[in-house]
């Protein structure tokens, strides 16, 4: 009698399928409007696999946030290594934010939903506040620029990090409302490129060491 070939299980692939399905659905509809049944339906897996790999819907949402943070952190570290000096490193970082937010719209949407939740999934206890590893690198780059005499010495590095993120993020988080009110298509690549060029000018004119009179 012919013997049936046993099905080969791939736990990592199953976990990734669940996570990718969750990211798509949570980004589109938010945490509360998505059920576990919808996630397993999209991922085409057994419902018990969600609880096996993640434990709960809340933990799955946290995993989704951790995954998109991991993606942007990889981009951040990679971007600054492309520059040969502090100014170039920060310019590559700003460029990378624009490119990443274009390529990964789920990041913007998930963060908007999480802010409506008052950041309850982004806690120190579950280590999801993952800006700290890159922030340390960012601070070192700014300090190198100050030491080289290129950047002003009175910079608040924490707020500078916020400005870097905000100047890029708003082109995606407020794309539709700004496009309507300003009659400008923020989804157009040429429009975003003009915006990036102005962001670069604003940032580097602002952080440059004042010329001595």
Image (spheres, grey):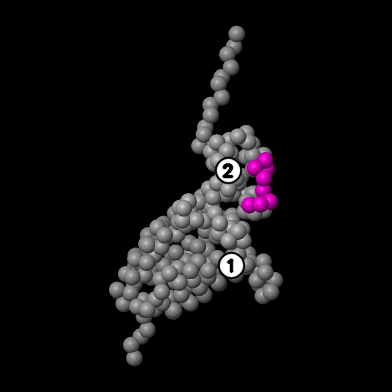
Q: Is residue 65 visible?
A: yes
Direction from residue 166 to residue 151 in the image, left or right: left
**Residue 209 x/y as whole percent:** 36, 80
Quick one: quadrant of the C terminus?
A: bottom left
Q: Which mark sits nearer the N-terminus, 2 or 1?
A: 2
Could you say which is closer to the camera, residue 34 or residue 117?
117
Could you say which is closer to the camera, residue 161 or residue 1?
161
Could you say which is closer to the camera, residue 111 or residue 202?
111
Direction from residue 88 to residue 193 in the image, left or right: right
For the record, the magenta segment spans 31-38
Residue 56's tag is 2
Secondary structure beneath disc 2?
loop
**Residue 169 x/y as whole percent:** 55, 65
The residue shown at (52%, 56%) is: 122
Whether residue 68 appears in magenta in the rendering, the answer is no
The residue shown at (62%, 67%) is: 174
Whether residue 33 appears in magenta in the rendering, the answer is yes
Please rate how many residues cluster around mark 1, counting C-alpha atoms within 10 Å: few if below 14, some from 14 to 19, many from 20: many
Q: Majority secondary structure of the magenta segment?
A: loop
Label 2 with label 1: CB-CB less than 8 Å: no
Q: How many marks?
A: 2
Q: Quadrant of residue 111?
A: bottom right
The residue shown at (60%, 70%) is: 191
Query: Disc 2 and disc 1: Cα gap in Å?
Result: 33 Å
**Residue 101 x/y as whole percent:** 55, 60
Q: Is residue 20 visible?
A: no
**Residue 112 x/y as whole percent:** 60, 61
Please rate how many residues cluster around mark 2, counting C-alpha atoms within 10 Å: few if below 14, some from 14 to 19, many from 20: few
**Residue corresponding to mark 1:** 171
């Amino acid at each position: 009698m012919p013997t049936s070939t046993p099905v080969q299980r791939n736990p990592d692939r199953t976990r990734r399928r669940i996570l990718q399905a969750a990211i798509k659905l949570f980004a589109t509809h938010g945490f509360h409007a998505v059920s576990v049944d919808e996630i397993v339906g999209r991922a085409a897996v057994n419902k018990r696999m969600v609880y096996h790999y993640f434990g709960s819907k809340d933990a799955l949402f946290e995993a989704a946030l951790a995954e998109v943070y991991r993606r942007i952190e990889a981009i951040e570290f990679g971007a600054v290594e492309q520059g040969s000096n502090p100014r170039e490193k920060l310019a590559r970082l700003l460029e990378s934010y624009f490119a990443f937010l274009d390529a990964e719209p789920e990041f913007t949407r998930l963060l908007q939903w999480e802010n409506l939740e008052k950041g309850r999934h982004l806690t120190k206890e579950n280590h999801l506040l993952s800006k700290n590893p890159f922030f340390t690198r960012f601070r070192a780059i700014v300090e190198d620029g100050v030491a080289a005499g290129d950047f002003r010495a009175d910079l608040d590095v924490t707020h500078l990090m916020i400005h870097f993120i905000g100047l890029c993020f708003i082109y995606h988080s407020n794309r539709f409302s700004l496009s309507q009110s300003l009659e400008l298509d923020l989804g157009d690549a040429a429009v975003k490129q003009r915006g990036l060029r102005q962001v670069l000018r604003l940032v580097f004119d602002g952080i440059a060491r004042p010329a001595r009179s």
